[in-house]
Image: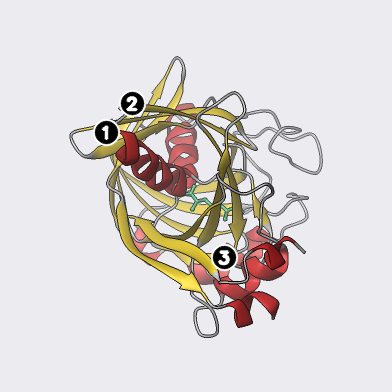
Amino acid sequence: MQIKDIPQGLPFMKMHGLGNDFVVIDSRARRAAVTTPALARTLGDRNRGVGFDQLAEIRAGRDTDIELDFWNSDGSRAGACGNATRCVAAFVMGETGAKALSIRTARGLLQARVEAGEVSVNMGQPQLDWAEIPLAVPTDTLHLPLAGDPVAVGMGNPHCVFFAEDADAAPVTTKGPMVETDPLFPEQVNVEFAEVRARDEIRMRVWERGTGVTLACGSGACATLVAAVRRDLTDRRVRMELDGGWLVLDWRDDGVWMTGPTAHVFDAILSPALLEA
Ligand SMILES: N[C@H](CCC[C@H](N)C(=O)O)C(=O)O
């Protein structure tokens, strides 16, 4: 496989946005992408590999500055990853000093911007139709037929948002995996537990499809804002407190913008022996 093209080992970066952590592989100079489900699982193991919530692989853009692919630590693909998009955008814009970047993902064309050290990405318009999310059967996405009356939102990946009195007391680790695999979601689902504190503030905790509990989820934060606006619980711009920190979310005419910090933690090389495993 393509891994044989890199006998010296595979360079990668470790990054995070609000503690939502990523291995980033820069394949802009390679002929083909290197990530396979097996490589994602190997690297994603926090004991035997490196550990990450998502793996992001950067590829050279054809009609955009870059292209991005996302993988979960169980080897499955993620159609969208807001925090990794912000991290990679910060890195690529940092190379040239550019203030804006165009990115193609499975979700479509995204725009990123940097201002005062914080990176914003437009995650696009949400998918509100049951077939697009997707759900298994025609369903009112604003009131899913599940206990707790959640809202379904697509952000290029599926989300199920529950509103809770107290997000810190929400059963993230028990209800999360149950809902993730509910037959209503043929591609499984990311599960958010949101507490509306004010028209401009939400506290949210998340169970991610293919990964489990994470400290933050960018696309989940966007989906949570969309659900709150559709239920008329908040305005279109909110501050959101996740376990790993704060994001600003803004649902504008051109899509849902997400702004927050990013961190580039270290650069390393994966040993060739692990690549062959
Ligand atoms: N952490 C990511 C989302 C990962 C979603 C993934 N778990 C999926 O299977 O859709 C974010 O910042 O948007």
Q: Secondary structure at mark 2?
A: loop
As rendered, which of 202 and 187 lies closer to the eye? 187
- Residue bearing the label numbered 1: 200
Work out whether mark 3 precedes mark 1 in sequence or the reverse, and give the earlier one: 1
Point 62% across, 49% down: residue = 30
Query: Would you say the residues marked 3 and 1 are in contact, meaning their CB atoms lie under 8 Å apart?
Result: no
As rendered, which of 98 and 37 lies closer to the eye? 98
The amino acid beneath tag 1 is: Asp
Cβ of disc 2 within 8 Å of ligand 1?
no
- Residue bearing the label numbered 3: 211
Q: x, y (%) of residue 127? A: 62, 29
The amino acid beneath tag 2 is: Asp
Within-10-Å neighbours for mark 1: few <14, some 14–19, many 20+: some
Mark 2 against mark 3, which lies toward the viewer? 3
Query: Would you say the residues marked 1 and 2 are in contact, meaning their CB atoms lie under 8 Å apart?
Result: yes
Question: 104 left or right of 223?
Answer: right
